[in-house]
């Protein structure tokens, strides 16, 4: 349908190429191949990992395990199936180019007529969907918020438990926080995890905070680690600090990796300008509602107290969530839950309101969405109950729903018209001869 | 063509012959001489009980358990007929329905444990268990519970060793051993559940007998009804319960503690509190435990009494009377709480078996449609076949509608439902295509599609061995999304399957030279494949995005690249690419047909294979039979694709047919 223009200017030709339907077909097939390979890859890797490698990257070496009837054709010595390696562009540039192709070919260069109305509307919906995806990828973030059920009596509250929260913590992303003890308050200076990646393996990252009299050197950053005591029988090439060392963990064969369950660790060395030296292991222990407190590595330089903490990224919320009651109903005679829901009070400067959050019924407020995801203690249940929410900030939250309606209207118009035309046509009559 | 048909018929006959092999022989004598009365089996099949989170009829429990342990819909064996004086007993074949089988497990445990039940497909398993065998044969071996349970420890060790191996390293024997151990456990629980009711308790000692009105033998009911007096007696006996003056008190206590803690199974005792108050169903061990702790329920004791009378009865008449009394008491209590309403409907549902009748109607219609192709001038046959198709779709709708009424959910909640739904929608889509373009091919395909998918549903039901109406986990309990996203998506799958069938017909027409690709027959099939693909695309795209909107509301993300989501996206991408390739002239008829067959394979991938990968949020069904089915489908589609592709490469432009096309029979619709 793209009007074949006779224009010979390079711009016009580039536009024609960019908007050509053949390009769309190839891009769609490429995306299909990536989707397929990215699905099979999830057998051995976490969904999050595959998402980053295949769908959010510019380039990927896809791995195709060769198997027939569910049995691998060749097994390597470690029992994993032999894989074919195929270099491909990542889904991200493919979808970006496809979006351009769609806008140029499917909207701008297409004739805006009633005849094409259905297709145009559909294309607008798809563009909206792709843009929503891009906005989600670049602008949204999410994490978890876990709180205990608020006890009725003041005296039953434990200081170590979190009953109310106005922030949430990331599932995957960590940060190195430098805490400066200012007496009344604590000043935080943050370094994102990505800066520390250079300290993986034999690398090292040296950080220097403005106006502070020391440097922090990070070494041996490990993404999935545990910190273990160094006993006499333990062999390790890692340094031993205070009788402990960092061991890199890996997922056993046949176990589905979960990036949420991976806890990073690293070694830090603080060198003050006066020549003092402090060494420590930092581990990003998971934050659970059981424990409100964290225990950063403390050190003192020139009489000022500092702390270093490797922790999951914390995001602030413009409102606080308090868990008033948690309720779990099982299918009778089983342990499988039929319903689990949280009765919460949401409060901000303007006041407070009560709400229920349960499966398929999130709380939407101030651009944030709060979902019921988990509960505890598992598997026995409470009291004391705690509830785990996922909190997401996503500007394009409702765009897909709008896109869905737009696309539905477009497809209905287009295919409806085609069907009616066919029922009316002589083509049918001639085929029915 | 004729030789091909003859070989197909011969293969079918061979298959049928192999199915009708002599059933295995029962070891030992029959304890139950007379068959269960048919009317009693029907009544008792409707007994309400609670199992796996819902109230269901006894017949459903019996059927799902039998499918799980036996892998068949009935138990068949050869046993000596009732001996008549002086004559040599003759052999007869006994065939038990699931309800009759479970009744035997309850009432004749000694006979039921000799039934040839556990299917051994691979002699390697017999070797693992240390059984003698005559080498691998074409047929299956069936081991009775008694024999298998004797090797239970060996089996458990082998199963645990196999489970420790990573999946790619497991052999066929490993998988089989794991499955067999699970089956043994299921039967074992069933066998143990009523063990406490299988005999009478001996009462020794004056004091104890006085407590039970001088009885020397005691059934559980008698003890439960005197539970409070018995507890007082035990309390008073204190530490000295082994003293001689207390008779066999210690034995009784041991028996009760074992009976109260035996494996939980279906809850047979209905809640007794009025409707407004919360109460649950109880298992027999729970009732014993409650009674011993001072919470005896007199009606429960009476129900247990009637059940035990039934189990221990001397003759069939007495047995039927007692079990009927037990059933009536349970049904009345359940009805008082409104908990038995769906049970009656479910009993009707499984008794009426509408989808089975729909399948047979599809098959009859299919034969008529084939005849209609052979006799192109006969309009009556075409009309009859269309009528059979419509009738069968109607029966299938009735079946699915009944399921909705029973579960209280929209049509698709489990993988099993997708077979019925997709079969019905696929058949209906093709029937409409036939109505629009009367080529008789779509009619044949429609009836074939309907029968095939109901057949698959029935195979899956037995192979999976699970309750097909099992309650859903919390995230799926949203009738709005279950009613909007799931059917839309499955209509997309159904149309994708239908388009692939039409495309396969196109390939067959071209490759077998039934007609020229430019002749009206092939052109019509191409138009049909195109139209059905458009329909499939529209529903798949909307269904997929709806799924994303649902996911955004339940998991907080619109798209997570989860295998099932990717599968749905793959269908959309393949079909969008196909329609654009067609529009831009990249593919024509042949390319369209081949591509549609590939899309059919993608539908199979999305529908089943993604669930079998064992990862992601949609991994809700697994069975090795299903994986075999998936690969069979890939193979069939692959053969059609290869034949079509080779034909197109060898004969890019077939010469026009000189004579009237040999398949004119198919082509002419006048």
Image: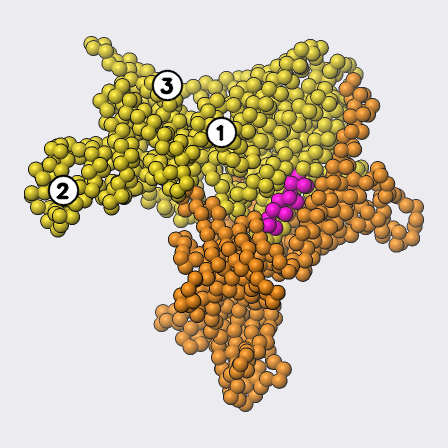
Chain colours: A orange, B yellow
Point out the stretch of residues depicted in magenta.
Answer: B540-553
Quadrant location of residue B513? top right
**Residue underneath mark 1:** B459
Which of A162/B434 is in front?
A162
Q: Is residue B388 magenta?
A: no
**How far apart in space, not on screen, are marks 2 and 3 (Cα)?**
43 Å
Image coordinates of residue B452 in percent, x first then y, are 56, 26
Judged from the image, the secondary structure of the residue bearing numbered disc 2 is helix
Image coordinates of residue A190 in percent, x first then y, are 59, 73
At x 61%, y 14%, the residue is: B368
When the figure is inspected, residue B348 is found, relative to residue B664, above or below; the finding is below
At x 52%, y 31%, the residue is: B405
Foreground disc of the pair 2, 1 = 2
Horizontal side of B353 relative to B271 (left or right) equals right
Image coordinates of residue A262 in percent, x first then y, are 51, 61
Which of A410/A215 is in front?
A410
**Residue underneath mark 3:** B39
């Amino acid at each position: 349908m793209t009007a074949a223009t006779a224009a010979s200017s390079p711009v016009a030709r580039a536009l024609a190429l960019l908007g050509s339907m053949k390009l769309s077909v190839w891009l769609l097939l490429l995306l299909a191949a990536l989707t397929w390979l990215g699905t099979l890859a999830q057998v051995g890797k976490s969904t999050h990992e595959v998402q980053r490698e295949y769908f959010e990257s510019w380039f990927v070496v896809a791995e195709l395990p060769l198997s027939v009837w569910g049995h691998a054709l060749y097994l390597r010595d470690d029992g994993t199936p032999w894989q074919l390696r195929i270099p491909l562009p990542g889904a991200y540039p493919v979808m970006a180019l496809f979006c351009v192709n769609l806008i140029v070919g499917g909207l701008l260069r297409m004739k805006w007529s009633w005849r094409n109305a259905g297709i145009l509307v559909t294309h607008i919906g798809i563009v909206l969907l792709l843009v929503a995806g891009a906005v989600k990828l670049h602008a949204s973030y999410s994490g978890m918020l876990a709180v205990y059920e608020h006890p009725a009596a003041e005296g039953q509250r434990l200081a170590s438990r979190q009953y109310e929260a106005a922030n949430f913590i990331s599932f995957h992303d960590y940060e190195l926080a430098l805490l400066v003890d200012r007496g009344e308050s604590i000043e935080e200076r943050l370094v994102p995890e990505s800066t520390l990646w250079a300290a993986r393996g034999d690398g090292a990252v040296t950080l220097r905070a403005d106006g502070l009299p020391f440097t922090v050197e990070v070494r041996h950053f490990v993404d999935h680690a545990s910190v273990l005591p160094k006993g006499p029988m333990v062999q390790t090439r890692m340094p031993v600090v205070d009788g402990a060392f960092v061991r890199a963990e890996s997922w056993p064969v046949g176990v589905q990796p979960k990036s949420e369950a991976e806890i990073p660790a690293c070694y830090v060395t603080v060198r003050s300008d006066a020549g003092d030296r402090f060494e420590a292991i930092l581990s990003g222990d998971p934050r659970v509602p059981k424990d409100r407190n964290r225990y950063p590595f403390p050190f003192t330089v020139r009489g000022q107290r500092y702390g270093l903490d490797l922790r999951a990224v914390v995001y602030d919320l413009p409102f606080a969530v308090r868990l008033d009651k948690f309720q779990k109903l099982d299918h009778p005679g089983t342990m499988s839950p039929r319903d689990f829901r949280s009765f919460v009070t949401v409060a901000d400067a303007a006041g407070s309101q009560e709400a229920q959050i349960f499966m398929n019924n999130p709380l939407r407020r101030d651009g944030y969405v709060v979902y019921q995801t988990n509960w505890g203690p598992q598997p026995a249940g409470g009291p004391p109950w705690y509830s785990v929410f996922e909190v997401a900030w996503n500007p394009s939250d409702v765009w897909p729903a709008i896109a869905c309606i737009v696309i539905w209207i477009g497809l209905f118009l287009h295919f409806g018209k085609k069907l009616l035309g066919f029922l009316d046509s002589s083509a049918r009559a001639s085929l029915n001869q | 063509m004729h030789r091909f048909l003859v070989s197909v018929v011969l293969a079918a006959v061979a298959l049928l012959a192999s199915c009708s092999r002599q059933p295995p022989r029962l070891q030992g004598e029959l304890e139950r001489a007379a068959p269960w009365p048919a009317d009693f089996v029907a009544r008792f099949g409707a007994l309400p009980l609670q199992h796996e989170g819902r109230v269901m009829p006894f017949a459903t429990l019996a059927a799902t358990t039998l499918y799980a342990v036996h892998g068949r819909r009935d138990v068949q064996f050869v046993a000596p007929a009732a001996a008549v004086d002086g004559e040599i007993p003759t052999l007869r074949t006994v065939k038990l329905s699931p309800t009759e089988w479970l009744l035997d497990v309850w009432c004749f445990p000694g006979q039921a444990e000799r039934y040839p039940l556990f299917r051994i497909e691979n002699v390697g398993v017999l070797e693992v268990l240390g059984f003698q065998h005559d080498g691998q044969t074409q047929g299956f071996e069936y081991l009775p519970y008694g024999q298998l349970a004797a090797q239970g420890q060996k089996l458990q060790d082998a199963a645990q060793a196999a489970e420790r191996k990573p999946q790619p390293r497991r052999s066929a024997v490993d998988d089989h051993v794991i499955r067999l151990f699970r089956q043994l456990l299921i039967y074992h629980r069933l066998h143990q559940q009523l063990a406490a009711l299988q005999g009478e308790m001996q009462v020794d000692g004056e004091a104890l007998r006085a407590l039970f009105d001088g009885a020397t033998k005691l059934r559980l009911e008698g003890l439960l009804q005197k539970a409070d007096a018995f507890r007082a007696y035990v309390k008073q006996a204190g530490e000295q319960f082994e003293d001689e003056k207390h008779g066999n008190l210690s034995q009784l206590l041991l028996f009760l503690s074992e009976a109260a803690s035996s494996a939980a199974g279906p809850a047979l005792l209905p809640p007794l509190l009025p409707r407004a108050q919360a109460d649950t169903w109880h298992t027999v061990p729970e009732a014993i435990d409650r009674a011993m702790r001072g919470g005896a329920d007199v009606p429960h004791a009476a129900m247990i009494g009637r059940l035990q009378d039934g189990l221990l009865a001397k003759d069939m008449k007495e047995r039927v009377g007692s079990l009927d009394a037990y059933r009536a008491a349970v049904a009345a209590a359940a009805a008082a709480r409104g908990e038995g309403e769906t049970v009656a409907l479910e009993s009707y549902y499984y008794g009426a078996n509408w989808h089975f009748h729909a399948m047979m109607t599809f098959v009859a219609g299919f034969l008529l449609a084939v005849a209609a192709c052979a006799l192109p001038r006969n309009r009556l046959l075409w009309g009859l076949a269309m009528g059979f198709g419509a009738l069968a779709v109607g029966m299938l709708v009735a079946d699915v509608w009944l399921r909705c009424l029973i579960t209280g959910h929209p049509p698709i909640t489990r993988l099993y439902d997708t077979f019925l739904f997709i079969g019905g929608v696929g058949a209906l889509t093709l029937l409409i295509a036939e109505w629009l373009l009367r080529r008789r091919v779509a009619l044949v395909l429609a009836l074939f599609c309907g029968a095939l998918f109901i057949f698959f549903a029935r195979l899956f039901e037995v192979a999976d061995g699970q309750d097909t109406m099992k309650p859903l986990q919390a995230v799926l309990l949203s009738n709005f999304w279950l009613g909007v996203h799931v059917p839309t998506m499955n209509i997309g799958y159904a149309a994708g399957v239908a388009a692939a069938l039409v495309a396969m017909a196109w390939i067959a027409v071209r490759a077998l030279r039934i007609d020229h690709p430019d002749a009206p027959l092939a052109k019509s099939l191409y138009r049909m494949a195109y139209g059905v693909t458009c329909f499939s695309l529209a529903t798949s795209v909307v269904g997929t995005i709806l799924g994303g909107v649902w996911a955004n509301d339940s998991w907080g993300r619109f798209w997570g690249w989860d295998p099932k989501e990717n599968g749905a996206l793959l269908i959309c991408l393949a079909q969008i690419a196909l329609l654009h390739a067609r529009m831009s002239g990249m593919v024509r008829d042949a390319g369209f047909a081949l591509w549609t067959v590939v899309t059919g394979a993608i539908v199979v991938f999305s529908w089943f294979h993604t669930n079998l990968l064992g990862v992601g949020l949609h991994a809700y069904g697994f069975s090795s039979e299903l994986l075999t089915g998936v690969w069979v489908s890939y193979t069939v589609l692959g053969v059609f694709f290869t034949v079509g592709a080779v034909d197109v490469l060898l004969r890019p432009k077939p010469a026009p047919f000189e004579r009237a096309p040999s398949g004119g029979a198919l082509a002419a619709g006048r």
